[in-house]
Image: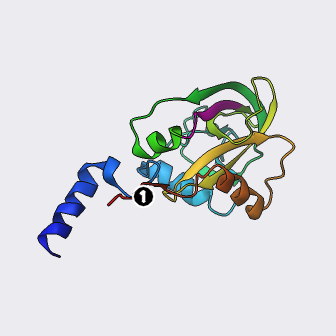
Amino acid sequence: MNLKEKMQRRLKLSRPSLRARARPPKHRTTLGAQFTAANLSTALALQHCKSCGHTQYPPTELCGICLEDQLIYQPADGAGVILAKTELHHSLWEYFKRRLRQGSWPLCSVALNSGPEVIAHLGSDHLKAGDPARVFSHTDASQQAVLIAVDANVDVSYPEARREIVSAMNLDIPAIKEDGL
Ligand SMILES: [Zn+2]
């Protein structure tokens, strides 16, 4: 590696705005990494307490109800109701900075029928507070699981259908800078 390449590599690390490909945040805690792994093969898997049956999100080390540590991931029903909807207009993260140049980024909170309340990317623009919704998980451009909420009528039981929604949101590809490093 010559000096120019070394300098470019250093710039790429220290100046995200110069990267050719900017990706969503990839850092996760150990519990977050477990969540991604558990969600790879299914529409939505949430932590379930073997002792009291409580379903919870975000993942923790102990059950939020009975404090037992026997927590397993189980496929969960993503049906729920939109609690609130908002739009991201500003971000310090390069991936979202570039995405936001094309328009605001919709997000929502959803109360799942199975109990937990989650924050998710909003995949169906017309949804508003009080509307029925369906939440599923998918890997983003950083190969980490993120949650996406869509209209309750959308069938997300097949991986192809989920991939199509994520692709339409451009969540599965990096944000490109043409002359980047
Ligand atoms: Zn419990």
Q: Is residue 109 magenta?
A: yes
Relative depth, front residue between 166 and 109: 166
How many dots with numbers?
1
Q: Which residue sits furthest left?
A: 3
Residue 147 is left or right of residue 98, and the answer is: right
Q: Residue at x 52, y 38 (%)?
A: 100
Q: Which residues are magenta?
A: 102-110
* Scheme by which the image is coloured: rainbow
Q: Which residue sits furthest front?
A: 179
Q: Residue at x 47, y 49 (%)?
A: 24
Tell me if mark 1 has few (under 14), some (14-19) or many (20+) residues whose alpha carbon lies within 10 angstroms of its own: few
Q: Quadrant of residue 125?
A: top right
Q: Residue at x 63, y 45 (%)?
A: 147
Q: Is residue 86 above or below residue 112?
A: above
Res 93 visible: yes
Residue 116 is left or right of residue 35, and the answer is: right
Q: Quadrant of the C terminus?
A: bottom left
**Percent from the top left, x then y, of residue 30?**
43, 52
* Mark 1 lies on residue: 178
**Percent from the top left, x then y, of residue 75?**
72, 53
Residue 11 is left or right of residue 106, and the answer is: left
Q: Is residue 47 magenta?
A: no
Q: Is mark 1 within 8 Å of ligand 1?
A: no
Relative depth, front residue between 75 and 118: 118
Q: SS for tag 1?
A: loop
Residue 85 is left or right of residue 1, and the answer is: right
Res 113 visible: no
Q: Quadrant of ligand 1?
A: top right
Q: Quadrant of the N terminus?
A: bottom left
Q: What's the magenta bit mostly, secondary-structure-wise?
A: strand
